[in-house]
Image: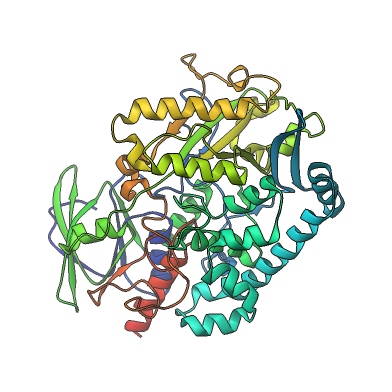
């Protein structure tokens, strides 16, 4: 769409071509609305993209977001998306050392194997039975809460009635999740494995009074009504490519290389000013949907900036010539890395790492988790790599808030990567470095992204992958009917910072589209 061609008018302008913006555009275009998507980068997809990060290497990695749980099948069906996910037969593996001997906890592969793995680690049945009871409880909550994400926001008491389980409501919605974990589990490693779902991209302690950890935990256990985290076939870019295709085929205009710079509105009509390499332009619309953070929304509208957000993770992408051997010879690496491989994530280790980071220090034993996409979906590897046994590894580090990188992002990132991999090496029978592939220039195939890198590259505020603290999935003062409303009646927030945003879900995009269609019915 060339700049300087005069103002063109659309029913809706979507600012940002990430997955939520594309969901909104596809719904609105299929409903017969004229839609323009303005995307700053040269491609759509936002953080949900597949790229070849290593020079001359035919491996398409999910560079930023990497697993799918919160995407409702309703959206896939409604939009006719050619997009599939595959389940992981192994949920997780957590290595440990007990009595001077390497061991670990393998969850998955069937009920018998999981029960035996718990007994092997803990010496009895108690922890496994507690695990079964706890996740049966979260499973019931998931079945009742997940369908509400694409409905108008329920009131708090309405959602409580739908949950219909006072024990679960207290454990997940009212008390710090650390209370529930400590009441139910005794083993430190088991406690840590449970807690990790409360800390993904969330810098909080198990007993944080804000309950930020509870909100994070809730979204991680309700996905799909089961809490399962699945592998996107073809990488995460397969989803956003399918969404872009659905939006285009329905008539939406997707304009990449178009950076929105301002939004003006009188509540009935709006104009979006944008910049391209060739100049500037203006698009007018009845509604504007902003698929960006609350910080970017405020900058565009001239409103007061929200409270600063902060990310707290290290994202590492790797390509290996082979999977490393484990010190725990009872577990096949192809199983250990197929699920979530927990590193330095015992309960006390997580508390220590949080306390050290809160004091302004890098954690001495940085906690992280790894999984191998290519074990479940080898299509992301070129035939030559797959045939030679190459594998990808994705690592997500916890408790590394953006503030720690402020003094020297490159130096701190390098220091943190080294110490994080050292924690992994402690459980391997060979150094990970010996397994890394090299690119066309002979460099090891490994890249790391700090929160500051994500802010710079994707404009995630403070590198926060959720754009701001996650919200409860119920109505509160000022949240509006769908959780996407802003103080401007015809400007909607459809990014991860909307109520019920966060993760690769498409939920804010769906809900913003529904709000527009209700308003123009």
> Looking at the image, which residue is at 47% across and 66% down?
507
Left or right: residue 148 compared with residue 42: right
Left or right: residue 151 compared with residue 323: left
| Residue 317 location (% of width, % of height) | 51, 33
Can you see residue 399?
no
Label count reads: 0
Q: How is the image coloured?
A: rainbow
Can you see residue 347?
yes
In which quadrant is the C terminus drawn?
Answer: bottom left
| Residue 238 location (% of width, % of height) | 53, 49
Left or right: residue 320 compared with residue 243: right
- The foreground one among 269 and 321 is 321
| Residue 399 location (% of width, % of height) | 46, 43
Left or right: residue 67 compared with residue 1: right
| Residue 443 location (% of width, % of height) | 48, 17
- The foreground one among 218 and 507 is 218
- The foreground one among 493 and 364 is 364
> Which quadrant would residue 20 be assigned to in this image?
bottom left
> Which quadrant would residue 262 be assigned to in this image?
bottom left
Q: Relative to 144, does residue 508 appear above or below in the rendering?
A: above
> Looking at the image, which residue is at 60% across and 42% down?
345
Q: Relative to 15, does residue 319 appear above or below in the rendering?
A: above
Of all residues, the one furthest to the top in this rendering is 442
Q: Relative to 127, does residue 150 appear above or below in the rendering?
A: below
Q: Relative to 123, does residue 296 appear above or below in the rendering?
A: below
- The foreground one among 99 and 323 is 99
């Amino acid at each position: 769409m060339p700049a300087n061609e005069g103002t063109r008018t659309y029913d809706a302008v979507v600012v940002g071509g990430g997955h939520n913006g594309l969901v909104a555009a596809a719904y609105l275009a299929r409903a017969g609305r004229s839609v323009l998507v303005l995307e700053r980068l040269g491609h759509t997809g936002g953080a949900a993209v597949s790229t070849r990060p290593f020079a001359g290497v035919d491996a398409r990695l999910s560079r930023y977001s990497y697993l799918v749980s919160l995407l409702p099948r309703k959206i896939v069906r409604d939009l006719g998306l050619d997009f599939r996910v595959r389940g992981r037969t192994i949920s997780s593996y957590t290595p440990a050392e007990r009595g001077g001997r390497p061991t670990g906890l393998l969850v998955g592969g069937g009920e018998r194997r999981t029960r035996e793995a718990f007994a092997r680690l803990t010496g009895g049945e108690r922890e496994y039975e507690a695990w079964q009871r706890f996740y049966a409880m979260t499973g019931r909550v998931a079945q009742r809460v997940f369908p509400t994400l694409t409905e108008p926001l329920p009131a708090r008491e309405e959602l409580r009635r739908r949950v219909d389980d006072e024990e679960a409501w207290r454990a997940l919605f009212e008390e710090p999740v650390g209370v529930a974990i400590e009441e139910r589990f005794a083993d430190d490693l088991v406690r840590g494995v449970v807690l990790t779902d409360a800390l993904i991209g969330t810098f909080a302690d198990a007993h944080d009074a804000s309950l930020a950890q509870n909100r994070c935990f809730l979204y991680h256990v309700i996905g799909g009504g089961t809490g399962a985290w699945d592998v996107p076939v073809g990488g995460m870019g397969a989803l956003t490519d399918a969404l872009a295709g659905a939006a285009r085929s329905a008539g939406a205009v997707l304009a990449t290389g178009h950076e929105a710079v301002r939004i003006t509105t009188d509540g009935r009509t709006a104009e979006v000013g944008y910049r391209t390499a060739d100049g500037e332009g203006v698009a007018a619309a009845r509604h504007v949907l902003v698929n960006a953070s609350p910080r970017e929304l405020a900058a565009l509208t001239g409103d007061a900036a929200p409270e600063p957000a902060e990310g707290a993770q290290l994202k590492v992408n790797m390509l290996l010539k082979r999977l490393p051997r484990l010190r725990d010879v009872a577990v096949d690496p192809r199983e250990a890395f197929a699920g979530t491989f927990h590193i330095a994530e015992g309960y006390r280790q997580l508390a220590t790492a949080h306390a050290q980071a809160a004091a302004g220090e890098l954690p001495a034993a940085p906690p992280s988790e790894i999984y191998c996409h290519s074990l479940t979906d080898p299509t992301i590897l070129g035939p030559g790599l797959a045939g030679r046994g190459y594998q990808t590894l994705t690592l997500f580090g916890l408790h590394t808030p953006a503030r720690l990188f402020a003094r020297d992002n490159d130096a701190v990132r390098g220091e943190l990567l080294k110490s994080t991999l050292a924690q992994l090496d402690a459980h391997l029978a060979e150094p990970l470095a010996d397994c890394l592939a090299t690119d066309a220039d002979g460099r090891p195939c490994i890249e790391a992204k700090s929160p500051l890198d994500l802010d710079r590259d994707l404009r995630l505020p403070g590198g926060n992958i959720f754009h701001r603290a996650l919200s409860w999935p119920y109505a509160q003062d000022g949240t509006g009917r769908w959780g996407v409303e802003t103080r401007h009646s015809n400007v909607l927030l459809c990014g991860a910072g909307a109520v019920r945003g966060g993760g690769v879900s498409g939920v804010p995009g769906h809900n913003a589209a529904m709000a527009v269609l209700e308003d123009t019915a």
